[in-house]
Amino acid sequence: MNENFKLDIKQRPRRLRRSEAMLELCAETRVEASDLILPVFLKEGKSGAEKITSMPGVARHTIDSLLRLCESALNSGIRAIAPFPQVPTRLKSPNADEALNEKSLANRAISAVKRRFPEMLVAADIALDPYTSHGHDGILAPDGASILNDETVEVLSGMALMAARAGADIVAPSDMMDGRIGAIRAALDECDFQNTAIMAYSAKYASAFYGPFRDAIGSAPAQGKGGKKKYLDKRGYQLNPSNAREALREVLLDEQEGADIVMVKPAGPYLDIISKVKESTNLPVAAYQVSGEYAMIRAAADKGWIDLNRARNESLVAIKRAGADIILTYFAQDYIKNTRLG
Ligand code: PBG
């Protein structure tokens, strides 16, 4: 090594990476508690929370334990939840009748949360998959192969109205039927819910990363027989993973129909879509880090193959950096409690 070797350069970007304080001072992106929506799973009954095997660290909550969860979420600065119900099998039907029960598990949970914690934002899921015996997000055509669009939208509009009545601040259609945002907006306005916001799952892809979620809400067992799990094919309504321009088309339609927030889902494998959507709209952009993204990080960390805190923080900051204003993530609470360690 030559002791006198010196580069004659003025620019040394590493000056800004010399200490923790300097790194933080120059950080371009920060993920804050106020950016996050915590998705939560619900079950009937009185006993406490129950583990979900494919999502370590995530539980299915009764309404009582949900209220305790909300309290701890609010204490850590998380002010928005998105509940998803595990509907008892006996209440599922081909036409999702239970979706229109104003006393459904989801609607009871929404009103219980809003009564106890009026400051907690609740984003109600509007989709039929928790309620259909076949697990699809809509009503099946007589041929059994396709999903009926307009018939499904009619049910979704009624469902959105009930969620608004139960006190939901946001209704979030996650179904991908055509024209549902306009129909839901009209139904809400007609009943004086002008102030209920719509967060549209606009660019929702037909993804393999939803696997653990289908376990969590129990829409998976409907799909297979003899212990062999067959993944439900939703390509007839969710987006083709190979398409980007089609996502922008969906976003534009939802915006024209009255969406207040648009969403990209999944998040991590679709950072390019988040960034393109951000450029194409002035609405807030949400991104959903889905169950499979969560489970992959957790599983590798549980095996000691990656560092949980760092991988979690990196996955979230990447989603925000790509352009997401709002992130739905199962890591929400965990992230806030452990950010300093990353
Ligand atoms: C269905 C719905 C899905 C998710 C939220 N709502 C899965 C699907 O389309 O089958 C997935 C969320 C996740 O995987 O975390 N309406």
Image (cartoon, rainbow, N blue to C red):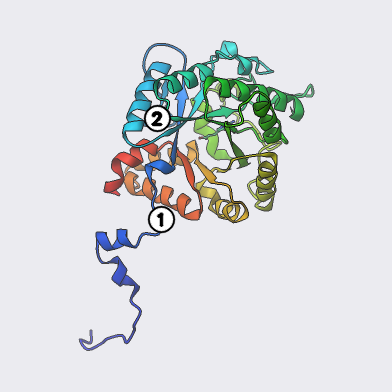
Residue receiving disc 1: 29
Residue 114 percent location from the top left of the image? 45, 23
Q: Is residue 4 visible?
A: yes
Report the amino acid beneath label 1.
Thr
Q: Foreground residue, 110 or 330?
A: 110
**What is the secondary structure assignment of the residue under circle 1?**
loop
Q: Foreground residue, 253 or 228?
A: 253
Q: Quadrant of ligand 1?
A: top right
Q: Residues within 10 Å of mark 1 (few under 14, many from 20)?
A: some
Q: Which mark is residue 58?
A: 2
Residue 184 appears left or right of 311? right
**As drawn, which residue projects farthest toward the right?**
143
Residue 281 percent location from the top left of the image? 61, 51
Q: Residue at x 65, y 46 (%)?
A: 251
Q: Is residue 146 visible?
A: no
Q: Residues within 10 Å of mark 2 (few under 14, many from 20)?
A: many
Residue 182 appears left or right of 322? right
Q: Residue at x 66, y 29 (%)?
A: 189
Foreground label between 1 and 2:
1
Q: Classify the position of the N terminus by image quarter.
A: bottom left
Q: Residue at x 43, y 25 (%)?
A: 118
Instruction: Give the answer, above or below, for where 144 lies relative to 262.
Output: above
Residue 122 percent location from the top left of the image? 48, 29
**What is the secondary structure assignment of the residue under circle 2?**
loop
**As drawn, which residue projects farthest toward the bottom?**
4
> Which is more N-terminal, label 2 or label 1?
1
Asked if the residue at label 1 sits under 8 Å from ligand 1, the reply is no
Report the amino acid beneath label 2.
Val
Residue 322 appears left or right of 9? right
Residue 271 percent location from the top left of the image? 53, 52
Tell how many labels: 2
The CA span between labels 1 and 2 is 27 Å
